[in-house]
Image (cartoon, helix red, strand yellow):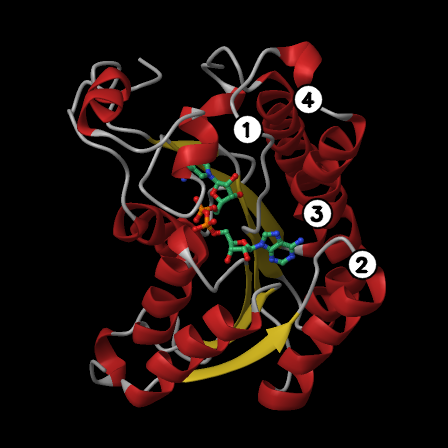
Amino acid sequence: MEDSAGQRLQGKVAVVTGAGSGFGAGIARRFAQEGAAVVVADLDRAAGQAVSGEIGEAGGRATFVACDVTERAAVRRMVEAAVEGYGGLDLLVNNAGYSHVNQPLTETSEADFDRVYAVNVKAIYLAALEALPLLRRRGGGCIINTSSTAALRPRPGLTWYNGSKGAVNTITKSMAAELAPDRIRVNAVCPVIGATGMLETFMGAPDTPELREKFLATIPLGRMSQPEDIAAAALYLASDEASFITGVCLEVDGGRCV
Ligand SMILES: NC(=O)c1ccc[n+]([C@@H]2O[C@H](COP(=O)([O-])OP(=O)(O)OC[C@H]3O[C@@H](n4cnc5c(N)ncnc54)[C@H](O)[C@@H]3O)[C@@H](O)[C@H]2O)c1
């Protein structure tokens, strides 16, 4: 770990959901490197424990909490872990996500539709119910939602997922306006496609170089997003350098939305 003088989240306590894999793991690792104590929350116990353990071995502070972000009692335990372990909560990253597979819009089952909106949208509501009293107690804080370029430049085959991320962007802006008097900033990051656990779901077919090429052709900078890209954007939004930034849905997309 860097010495504390160079750390941008020194003294902060963060909860990162979906931190067992992909972008969430990248955000958790980077926040810890920058001095934050991190609650690594995930449905996948083995994956979450591995990320939390890795952060600890690297000299950072992290605790794993098993949590389904669609269940209020679990969300309550998740934020309580921040208070019990580290004395409070400053940063909440609603990153866990779910998608139906890329398919014609009438082929998505009702169960899958409901799961998309439960994980991507309802979880933000539940986390707000449980986390806002804690952020207010600290005199302010920061919420970051992982949205997607899907909200801004929807691709066919992902209609219901795209709509859920549209809701994330509107909710982000509305929360920002409503919570500004409490000194709580709310922003979103909008990644373009990345090679995480969700890649094949988004592509709707097994991962091949040819299929990747089809997606890369729509990204001016010519590559997929990586956890480090999303983590760097989230770090900026979480840091004091972004103290006047709220209600922003920041594209991290190599120019995809241009
Ligand atoms: N990968 C992409 O192409 C891409 C692009 C834009 C946005 N996103 C968004 O990025 C976010 C992170 O996804 P990722 O790409 O890193 O995928 P990922 O599959 O690598 O990681 C997602 C993590 O969320 C966890 N999770 C899923 N449902 C959960 C639940 N109900 N409660 C708690 N944890 C849960 C999973 O166990 C997993 O560890 C999601 O919100 C996704 O919609 C992904």
Query: As rendered, which of 42 and 30 lies closer to the eye?
Result: 42
> Residues at badges 1 and 4 in contact (C-beta under 8 Å)?
no
Q: Badge 2 local density, few (<14 within 10 Å), some, or many (20+)?
A: some
Percent position of residue 21, x then y: 43, 59
Residue sitting at 30 percent across and 19 percent down?
Answer: 256
Query: As rendered, which of 55 and 9 lies closer to the eye?
Result: 55
Percent position of residue 3, x then y: 21, 85
State whether residue 13 is above or below residue 254: below
* Residue 108 horizontal side relative to residue 16, left or right: right
Percent position of residue 173, x then y: 63, 32
* Residue 142 horizontal side relative to residue 243, left or right: right
SS label for mark 3: helix
Mark 3 C-beta closer than 8 Å to ligand 1: no
For the N terminus, the image quarter is: bottom left
Q: Earlier in the sequence, mark 2 or mark 3?
A: 2
SS label for mark 4: loop
Residue sitting at 67 percent across and 68 percent down?
Answer: 139
Q: Which mark is residue 108?
A: 4
The residue to which callout 2 is attached is 71
SS label for mark 1: loop
